[in-house]
Image (spheres, rainbow, N blue to C red):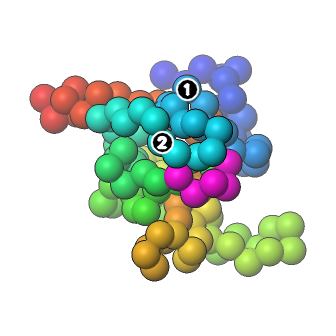
């Protein structure tokens, strides 16, 4: 159930865009090198559906939680021309919540999904697979 006073609720209702932060999801050193690898799945905070896999996460040094791809069928894209920029917004298929944006400058020619950590929770992979 959605906590109507939560930061995720604010993002959902008003598409609030805040500077990215790793939050308490994955520990990183100050120089951006991942120091803790957790076998987790990032889920939609509003409904619990899987959105991103730790195996697809990378350190982009952008300040945003970054992945090379979402879980198959979990997000959809929309053009976003706000703030004088041309970007591609991504939203959860399950709840329509704004997740962030996708760019074409990820590692090895892959996409870079920049995600607002406020809208995610994480669970152990085994709890999803059981």
For disc 1, the neighbor class at 10 Å (few under 14, some 14 to 19, many from 20) is: few
Foreground label between 2 and 1: 2
Q: Which mark is residue 34?
A: 2
- Determine which quarter of the picture holds residue 8: top right
Q: Main secondary structure of the magenta part?
A: loop
Q: Residue at x 53, y 52 (%)?
A: 59
Q: Is residue 25 above or below residue 57?
A: above
Q: Which residue bears the numbered disc 1?
A: 24
Residue 64 is a magenta residue:
no
Can you say which quadrant of the picture contains the C terminus?
A: top left
**Where are the magenta residues, as a range?**
59-63
Residue 47 picture location, percent across and down: 42, 34
Query: Quick check: 73 left or right of 114?
Result: left
Q: Residue at x 35, y 33 (%)?
A: 38
Mark 2 or mark 1: whose residue is earlier in sequence: 1
Instruction: Name the element at disc 2.
Output: loop
**Residue 52 in view, yes or no:** yes
Query: Quick check: 78 left or right of 75?
Result: right
Q: Is residue 104 above or below residue 96?
A: below
Q: Residue at x 68, y 73 (%)?
A: 87
**What distance separates the C-alpha of mark 2 from that of mark 1?**
13 Å
């Amino acid at each position: 159930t959605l906590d109507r006073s939560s930061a995720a609720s604010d993002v959902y209702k008003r598409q609030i865009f805040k500077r990215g932060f790793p939050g308490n999801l994955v520990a990183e050193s100050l120089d951006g090198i991942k120091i803790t690898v957790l076998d987790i799945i990032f889920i939609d905070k509003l409904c619990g559906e899987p959105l991103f896999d730790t195996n697809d996460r990378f350190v982009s040094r952008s300040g945003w939680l970054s992945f090379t791809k979402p879980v198959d069928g979990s997000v959809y894209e929309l053009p976003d021309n706000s703030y004088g920029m041309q970007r591609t917004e991504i939203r959860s298929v399950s709840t329509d919540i704004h997740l962030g944006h996708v760019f074409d400058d990820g590692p090895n020619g892959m996409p870079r999904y920049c995600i607002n950590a406020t809208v995610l929770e994480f669970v152990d992979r085994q709890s999803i697979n059981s």
